[in-house]
Amino acid sequence: MPKPFIPLLGKKTLFQATLERCADREIFTRPVVVVGERHLRFAEHQAEINAPDALFVVEPFGRNTAPAIALAALALDPDEIMLVCPSDHHITDPEAFRNAARIAAQMATEDWLVAFGIAATAPETGYGYIRRGEALDGGYRVQRFVEKPDLDTALGFLADGGYAWNGGIFAFRAGKFLAELSRHRPDLSSATRRAYELGTRVSAILRPDSDSFAAIEGESVDYAVMENTDHAAMVDVSMGWSDIGNWDALFRERQLPSDDNVIVGPGEVIGATGVMIDSDGPHVTLIGANDLIVVVDGEDILVTARSAVQRVGEASRCKDQ
């Protein structure tokens, strides 16, 4: 199953935790879940507890985040405030998240497109960054967005103190987002609207028209809108955030202060530190090799240095999937 629907940290999946953070109906309205056709069954089942009122917008195939967010916006009233939350992130301080959401929502009523600027605690090269500009009521104007930097640049950002991680969490008025998308990506906007208008809705499941959706040139919301609009703003938040973007990030989230290693499933580590074993069956014994990740999933076995986890996608088995 895809990452959002796996209980990587505790008994709840990342998707379930995302819904739970937004379950208070005095603060949040019913969620709109944009999901691929292949994954709808997972999302429906896991939403039963915290979001039985969810509306599902089912994409026939992926076209990146700008069309996905546009589909959700089209399903809402233009004046409703959208809180865009990737469902595969881990947040240890949900109250800090909700406080930031309240501030961002207020800014969004003034037609700012608000990004969550997550407190940078390390020179991460796998994250995008946001540079704070002039102060606004509740947040800051965005001076610029920076894509994944090299290590020296990331170290400079951390020392500077004026940069935050871009976690892909946003708040804006639905109508304002659609207007900005139409302004900066008119073809993408019109194709998405056509797919939505020609789509079908049965109960709580909305399916855009497949042929029209196929005509959309996919693009991220950052490239399509946020880096182009003159209404980009940000709110600062420190909420124990991680996108669990690779096995090393998962190791760091799982590791307890008292333990050098992480073992999930049958396994043992002898004379080594910085090791994670995650096995769903065979017993794994690792001796004298530091900073390794060993994952056993059925008949598939992954062994990687923690420093090389970004290269997992190069593996032929991963490409086949």
Image (tube, rainbow, N blue to C red):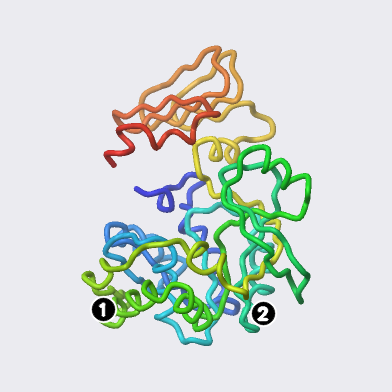
Question: Are the residues flagged by discs 2 and 1 in contact, CB closer than 8 Å?
Answer: no
Between residues 14 and 141, which one lies in front from this camera angle?
141
Residue annotated with mark 2:
106
Secondary element type, mark 2: helix
For this view, does 180 lie left or right of residue 202?
right
Q: Quadrant of residue 107?
A: bottom right
**Label 2: how many residues lie within 10 Å, few (<14), some (14-19) or many (20+)?**
some
Which of pointers 2 and 1 lies earlier in the amino acid sequence?
2
Whole-angstrom CA distance, mark 2 to mark 1, is 32 Å
The residue located at (53%, 53%) in the rendering is: 89
Which three-letter amino acid code belongs to the residue tagged 2? Gln
Which three-letter amino acid code belongs to the residue tagged 1? Gly
The residue located at (38%, 34%) in the rendering is: 314
- The picture places residue 76, in percent across and down from the top left corner, at 44, 82
- The picture places residue 66, in percent across and down from the top left corner, at 44, 67
Between residues 191 and 24, which one lies in front from this camera angle?
191
* Picture quarter with the C terminus: top left
In this rendering, is residue 79 above or below 219? below
Residue sitting at the far left = 211
For this view, does 265 lie left or right of residue 25?
left
- The picture places residue 92, in percent across and down from the top left corner, at 63, 53
The residue located at (40%, 80%) in the rendering is: 75
- The picture places residue 123, in percent across and down from the top left corner, at 67, 41
Residue annotated with mark 1:
199
Q: In which quarter of the image is residue 113?
A: bottom right
Q: Quadrant of residue 202?
A: bottom left
Secondary element type, mark 1: loop
